[in-house]
Image (tube, rainbow, N blue to C red):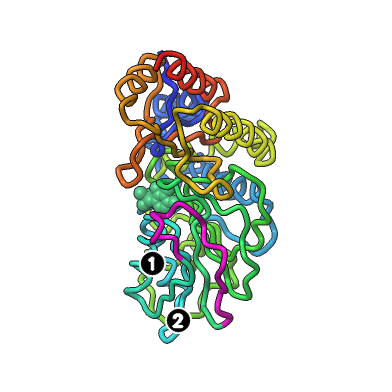
Amino acid sequence: MKKHNFSAGPSILPQEVFEKSAQAVLNFNNLGLSILEISHRSKDFVSVMEEARATALELLGLESKGYQALFLSGGASMEFVRVPYNLLKENGKAAYLDTGTWAAGAIKEAKRFGNTEIIGSSKEANYTYIPKDYTVPADADYFHCTSNNTIFGTQMHSFPETGVPMVCDMSSDIFSRELDFSKFGLIYAGAQKNMGPAGTTLVVVKEDILGKTGRAIPGIMDYGQHIAKESMYNTPPVFPVYTSLLTLQWIKNNGGVAAMEEKNNSKAELLYNEIDRNPLFTGTANTEDRSKMNVTFLLKDEKHTEQFDKLWKAADISGLNGHRSVGGYRASIYNAMPIESVKVLVDVMQELERNA
Ligand SMILES: *Cc1c(COP(=O)(O)O)cnc(C)c1O
């Protein structure tokens, strides 16, 4: 029995992606070989990489606009390091928006490289909102933000106009909504939230922002070298890349990012409406900054905890516990989450209200 999986990451993927990737482990492209045992330089895998890179750009509307897509490894956390390595000049300055644990992690790494200015932060309010009252300094080498704060359940619903390259960690909302992605100089996303298994990170970078720091960059850290080697600088994480490609194809075959956004809006509306209507629950994030991917909420009275936990577990729901820094509950409703599963959760919340 497949559970209703609300896990924040690694998280749900489309069922057909699980099935096709499992098949490729046994017999890839009818080669009589597993995808796990063929050379990454073989024609069959090279075309996986090429298609994954092209489909990522296509879904974001960035083909033939000077961007390159890379599938790297080391997680989003590695990009916390690669970004300043590749973009922060020796005597330059980076501007960061501090909107949560992951944003703070990116800031910590940038500080090791040089002058890093935090131009807005909601830390004092335990990251329950997105700061809006900030200006990006015109002399910054780049501006870094986190589009969706996976732990705190907040999301940027608008982005500033900046005169400098805008870098965005989109790990938990990539491909979930339409944006003018050409506003960004660099986008990165760990696969395991909304794209694939853990082990690869999508990096989309506008080529003309690179090569300006005057720094010597080790090859593995250098976006330029990864581009020159067509995302095969070293052995790529073949299975996560293949599985990510299957998800990208699934998105494309199901109406693209616009169709994902429409479904995600319906799921988020259904769940937030229940949180706001049901007298037993309350949301934790500032209403206008609520995330459509990670819905964080609390029981108003903790005495109902045991009863609620029993009810959702009995309904085959999994992965609903909140992050330890917020407590309560977090329902992650990524692209692959069907609205039927959200309805099951809403039913359980209503059942608690009737029986509490
Ligand atoms: C999960 C997450 C990360 C960390 O990703 P790793 O791949 O574990 O390094 C970074 N940023 C955001 C927004 C995340 O949700």
Compared with 272, 92 (above or below) is below
Task: Report x, y in % for residue 53.
Answer: 56, 50
Provide the residue designation for mark 2: 89
Image x and y of residue 354, in percent: 46, 14
| Label 1 CB less than 8 angstroms from ligand 1 | no
Residue hosting label 1: 107
Name the residue rendered at 38%, 67% in the picture. Answer: 107
* Mark 2 Cα shell of 10 Å, populated few (<14), some (14-19), many (≥20): many
Check if residue 195 falls in the magenta segment. no
Front-most of residues 259 and 340: 340
- Residue at image coords 40%, 35%: 298
Q: Nearer the viewer, mark 2 or mark 1?
A: 1
Give the answer, above or below, for where 207 lies relative to 13: below
Number of dots carrying numbers: 2
Mark 1: few/some/many CA within 10 Å (<14, 14-19, 20+): many
- Amino acid type, mark 1: Ile
Q: Main secondary structure of the magenta part?
A: loop
The disc at residue 25 is none
Q: Which residues are magenta?
A: 121-138
Looking at the picture, how far across and down is residue 82, in whole percent? 40, 66
Residue 235 sits above or below residue 6 on the image: below
Does 132 lie within the magenta span?
yes
Q: Earlier in the sequence, mark 2 or mark 1?
A: 2
Q: Nearer the viewer, residue 229 or 7?
A: 7
Check the picture and name the quadrant holding the N terminus.
top left
- Mark 2 vs 1: CB contact within 8 A: no
In this view, 166 is above or below 256: below
In the image, what residue occupies the spot 37% across and 79% down? Answer: 114
**The C terminus lies in quadrant:** top left
SS of the residue at dot 1?
Answer: helix
